[in-house]
Amino acid sequence: SEDRVFNFAAGPATLPESVLKKAESELYNWRGSGMSVMEMSHRGKEFLSIIQKAESDLRTLLDIPSDYAVLFLQGGATTQFAALPLNLCKPNDAVDYMVTGSWSDKSLKEAQKYCKPNVIWSGKSEKYTKIPSFDGLDQNPDAKYLHICANETIHGVEFKNYPTPKNANGLLVADMSSNFCSKPVDVTKFGLIYAGAQKNVGPSGVTIVIIRKDLIGYAQEITPVMLDYKIHAENNSLYNTPPCYCIYMCGLVFEDLLEQGGLKEIEKKNMKKAGILYDAIDESNGFYRCPVEKSVRSLMNVPFTLEKSELEAEFVKEAAKEKMLQLKGHRSVGGIRASIYNAMPLAGVEKLVAFMKDFQARHA
Ligand code: PMP
């Protein structure tokens, strides 16, 4: 609508307008309960219906089998960087990490405190613009799990398929924070998937963990109770007070994604949006440049630079004047980054592309 901007932020990020309107209409008095979701007991029947519906809609969206648990947790994806090794290994166990950008690097560094991670591939020397072919990966057959970041939010590198872990129980673990629910995913290929909500499915404050049930119950002795998957699974994410309102918002987003036809439809829309943006970059005769190898370019986070880098600040400023916000690249890499999650409308990307062409015409 008129008073809304196009928000290209990497997260917290734009949410579907229809979801915000629905939340607004239910904010003061949720479905005749006489109170807001923010005020409800997390153990009351109203909130139980909200969290159960959110879980069941997510299960439908991602086709999550019954031998997987779905947990709604706190502490962001960052907390999961520690929870993974604490729950899935002993201090001397080896694990494999692929380092494809800043986020997998951060998860690796946290794992170093609780087990013995090994970097089996790093894209650092190539500035995190690639994902290797999986055949040549030197996986440790004794590794307890293989960790990947399915979409690197800062570098814009996305796995289009997944490596097969060589470890005994075939355990692949993925940080899907920035491409969660952006496309169908075969959950059965993973032992564990985790994602902070604030990019594709809701506000910050809730982190979703999808874990194969047989992996639950082996946490290291020192594991804080809040990081122990067994505690949360046994208590249906209600061991302590959960982020109730955030879970409610995620539930509204899941409903909306189902109404749009599910993740196959969502993926089509995302491919179209990313397609026109990457085309605009590639067809600019070098005025704009995306450093990421074409086959692994992210559908969610599109980083690019200007050949005349001194124009980047001007680009961001002029775009903001036209109500396109948060286009500055991450402070660690500079340049421009357009995050175009599920809730970014095609019209937003079309407007950005038109602006890019106009900006180029004026500054070429
Ligand atoms: N992993 C990825 C891929 C991310 O993009 C982010 C946040 N930008 C994180 C982890 C950290 O998430 P949080 O801030 O929720 O801890």
Image (cartoon, rainbow, N blue to C red):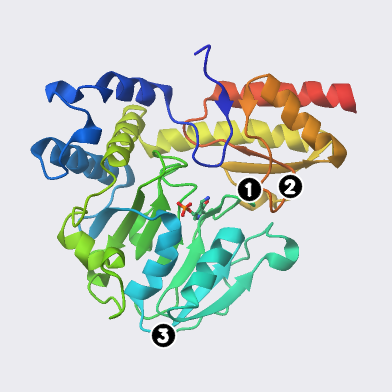
Q: Residues within 10 Å of mark 2 (few under 14, many from 20)?
A: some
* Label of residue 334 in the image: 2
Compared across the picture, whether 315 is left or right of 73 comes to right
Select label 3 or label 2 by which is in front.
2
Q: Earlier in the sequence, mark 1 or mark 3?
A: 3
Give the spatial CA distance, label 1 vs label 2. 18 Å
Amino acid type assigned to the residue bearing label 3 in the image:
Asp
Compared across the picture, whether 43 is left or right of 196 comes to left
Q: Secondary structure at mark 1?
A: loop
Q: Is residue 280 above or below residue 227?
A: above
Q: Find out if the beta carbon at label 2 lies less than 8 Å from the nearest ligand 1 atom.
A: no
The residue identified by callout 3 is 93
Give the spatial CA distance, label 1 vs label 3. 33 Å
Q: Is residue 301 above or below residue 238?
A: above
Which of the two residues, 159 or 124, is positioned nearer the viewer here?
124
Q: Secondary structure at mark 3?
A: loop
The residue most toward the bottom is: 92
Q: Residues within 10 Å of mark 1 (few under 14, many from 20)?
A: many
Q: Specify the quadrant of the image occupied by residue 42.
A: top left
Select label 1 or label 3 by which is in front.
3
Which of the two residues, 121 or 84, is positioned nearer the viewer here?
84
Which of the two residues, 115 or 33, is positioned nearer the viewer here?
33
Amino acid type assigned to the residue bearing label 1 in the image:
Arg
Q: Is residue 130 visible?
A: yes
Q: Where in the figure is residue 9, as x and y percent of width and height?
A: 57, 37
The residue identified by callout 1 is 297
Q: Residue at x 68, y 49 (%)?
A: 331
Q: Earlier in the sequence, mark 3 or mark 2?
A: 3
Amino acid type assigned to the residue bearing label 2 in the image:
Gly
